[in-house]
Image: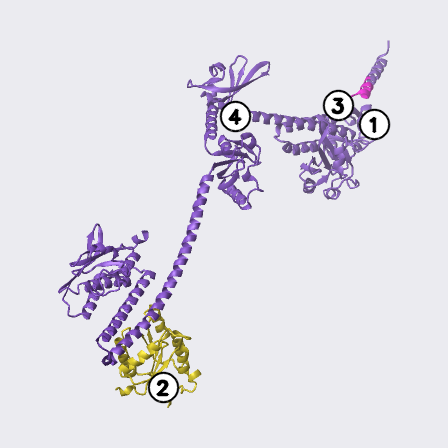
Amino acid sequence: MNTKTIDKVILLVEDNPDDQELALLAFKEANITSKIITCSDGEEALDYLFATGMYADRDARIMPEVMLLDLKLPKVDGFEVLKRVREDPRTKLLPVVVLTTSSEQKDLVESYQLGTNSYIRKPVDFSKFIEFAQQFGSYWLGLNESPIRRGVRREN
Amino acid sequence: MPTKLQQSQSDLQKSDERFRAIFDHAADGIGVLDNNSHYIQVNRKLCEILGYIEDELIGKPLSEIMHPDDHGENLNQSDQPISGLVDTFPLEKRYIRKNGSIIWVHVSTAVVHGPSGDPIYSISSITDLSERKRLEIFHSVANTLAKSKTITKAMPRIIRIICETLGWDCGAHWKVDEEKQQYYCTETWSLANTQIKKFMTYSSQCVFPVDHEGFIKRTWLSNRPVWISDITTESIFKRASQAVEAKLQSAFAFQILSADKTIGILEFFCRNTQKPDSALHETALSIGVQIGQFIQHKQIEDAQKRSEVQLSCIIQSAMQAIIMVDEEMNIVLFNPAAEKIFGYKSKDVIGTKINKLIPARLMGLRRNREEFPIEASISNLTLSGKKFYTVILSDLTLSLAAEENLHLATEVIKNVQEAIVIINASMKVISVNPAFTSITGFTEDEAIGKVPRIFNEDINSNDLYQAMWSSLRKTGHWYGEVWDQRKNGDSFCQGLSLDTIKNLYGEIAYYAAVFYDITDRKHTEERILNLNTELEQRVTERTRQLQASNKELEAFSYSVSHDLRAPLRAIDGFSQLLLKKYIDQLDEPGNNYLQRIRNASERMGGLIDDLLQLSKVSACKIKTKPVDLSQLVHSILTELQETETNRQVEFNIQDGVFIDADPRLFRIVLENLISNAWKFTGRKERTIICFGIKEQNGEQVVFVNDNGAGFNIKYSHKLFGAFQRLHSVTEFEGTGIGLATVLRIMNLHGGRIWADSTLGEGATFYFVVPPPGSSEDN
């Protein structure tokens, strides 16, 4: 068990229920115990981040440690979410990892242009996905210092 | 018998009678004057000359008769010492007649002395000099006119002669300007007196309209001289105030007549009061006629001289030979053209017979014995009773050459295939050639006199018309393609060339229109143009379709890459979870099935990746640059070795193999070829993979060779087709898309790929990529 990861929240934006389930299982296999919030489309993700709509009651000051963002999403797609996140001062510094099936060069370039911190292609092989989950957890929840979390602590 | 005294008295009486007779009938005027110079006796002639009757003259002092200016001379002379009985003083003097007019007389005075030697009386004999003066004037005027080159130069001298002879101070010559209908002063003369000169200068600047009453007009129209005794009281004299300033008193003017026509006026002025004088009138009239005649003669003479000069010029400068012969056919005149044509100098042939030069009819003979054709005209004239013949002849040698040229030009115009139309300056056709008729169908008679369509402003478009004229004006030339109609109504296209043609004086007098029928060519051009347009449309359409299908393909592969893999992940993921967590609840076949599900999903993942790559390769544009293939091969093999570290592999890689190609696409090519070699040698104990370049049939061929399973050469045609596999999946895994992708890349580069193999012993893949530039030509 990695105690460092206990309090941290991961925001997973993924529309495919199979992928949602597999991701959760993979994180579990990788021993990541952080709370994982799942949003099934871009609109829901934005509602969560800015505490609007169905998340209006949420404490907007608590930001996820990292957001895992699929690009192909219903309603508001991943690029739009990324754009809005980077435009808003509250989420401007939020670490975002694009997690997508697309191997298109232009998707990769556009994601980085819009300000993603990382771009990961979903592997077909589930065992490789577990490997990803382990590396993801140890890097983003362990090694990496998040600007968001520090900002919140200072306010408290 | 009479006594001596009686005799003496009688003699004296007789002598006195004789004297009386002589005295009374003398041709000269004779007066006897006493010591105080009063007339005591006058004869009839004297009365006649001076205009008095005898009684009026008797007792009159000479001083009243004599012109005041001439007094001194007379008085002095009477004081001179006297010797002998009679002294005579012949002198020319002016006497004043009863009517105030002046008369020039020759005076001869004899003084009779008494026995004591004192003068008793004098006898003065006068001769009227008017006639002599007139003759003197005529003589001087004639002399002046003869010596002067022009009337203008002669006239001031003539005025001076008249002034000096007749005692006037200044004078002017007036003429009429027919065009402006006014009199103007041409020449003047005056005494060397500033005031008088000033008046003359003023007069010379005056003009008087012919319809305005005045001194000049009156004189011009009058048959008599016009006299003004006092110009200050004469209203017709317009220059009165200026004349008064010059202290001039009297004016006198008369006509210069030529053949009863007034050709000029001479006017004179003097400071004295001069009374009209009928004798002077007569003199003036005859002087006027005389001058007129002189002027006329002078003019005729000048004209004759001019025409002589002109004739001489013509003869000297004529292009034609002019030869004059006398009755004996001896040459008397030989002009420069004749010298040039015949080759003889004038001095060599003058006096010789003309048949030396013209031996035969209408043939000339040059000095160098060359015969030449001539054209001659002969005229005769009689001079001083002798007959002369003038021969004017032209050398026809050049004319014949010109005729030959004309003949040639005519033949050319007649025989060329191009229609030739000559148009005059009024835009009417004056000549057409046979080609015109054969192209248009219009005969010569139908065309001549018509305005060609190209010159018809109504028929042609304004732009064409303006462009044509602009070009003709600027360059004298225009070319254009013009549609016209044949006589039968068919349209045809002319390639029309228009040129301006100048006449001998350099004026644009003709237009030459030369055209040929370009209808067939025009139709062919149109067809080509239409085909091109159609082709362009087709290409545009194709391009549009291609762009559309490329778009569709992009959308498709995007969708595939996202959506097709998602279910695979689920299949793989959940199968693995089953195998991991529920292995206890599965028997051996169940376990096997799950494993096969996983293998299938993995293969499908590979298939999807390869398909995506193939589609991307088809859609992409290549960017060529030098690529180090050897280095690529090394890096690919290194990656492969890392996946299977336990294999025995021998590489044989030629270094420095470069080609011009798209680096990203050639990495795909080599990945496929090398991984194939890697894969198909998997069952060999020892793997040998070779890479290099060699010359084959003049081309640089790159090759990848292995010692693997190889393939049956009879299936080699299937090698590069998509989804074509020559081995079973259980033998060698693979999607059958890799080599199809390689082939596509080769095609994009304009290159070729082929393979050779012996089953079980290995395979060799060869490819050729043409250098950049040459592929674009294909």
Q: Which residues are magenta?
A: B18-28
Q: Is residue B578 visible?
A: yes
Mark 1 or mark 2, whichever is nearer to me? 2
Q: Which mark is residue B85?
A: 3
The spot of residue B74 in percent (x, y) is 74, 31
Amino acid at circle 4: Ala
* Three-letter code, disc 1: Ile
In the rendered structure, the residue with mark 3 lies on which chain?
B
From this view, report whether residue A24 is shown above or below residue B439: below
Q: Are marks 1 and 3 on the same chain?
A: yes
Q: Return the residue at label 2.
A: A151
Q: Is residue B88 left or right of residue B710?
A: right
| Residue positioned 67% across, 27% down in the render | B296
Residue B114 shows up from this direction: no
Q: Residue at x 82, y 23 (%)?
A: B44
Task: Tell me residue A124's x, y (percent).
Answer: 29, 73
**In the rendered structure, the residue with mark 2 lies on which chain?**
A
**Label 1: few (<14), some (14–19) or many (≥20) C-alpha neighbours in 10 Å:** some
Disc 1 from disc 3: Cα separation:
20 Å
Work out how far the residue at label 3 is from the one at label 4, CA to CA, in angstroms. 81 Å
Query: Which secondary structure, mark 4?
Result: loop
In this figure, which residue is indicated by the disc labeled 1?
B40
Marks 2 and 3, how far apart at CA: 175 Å
Labels 4 and 1 in the same subunit: yes
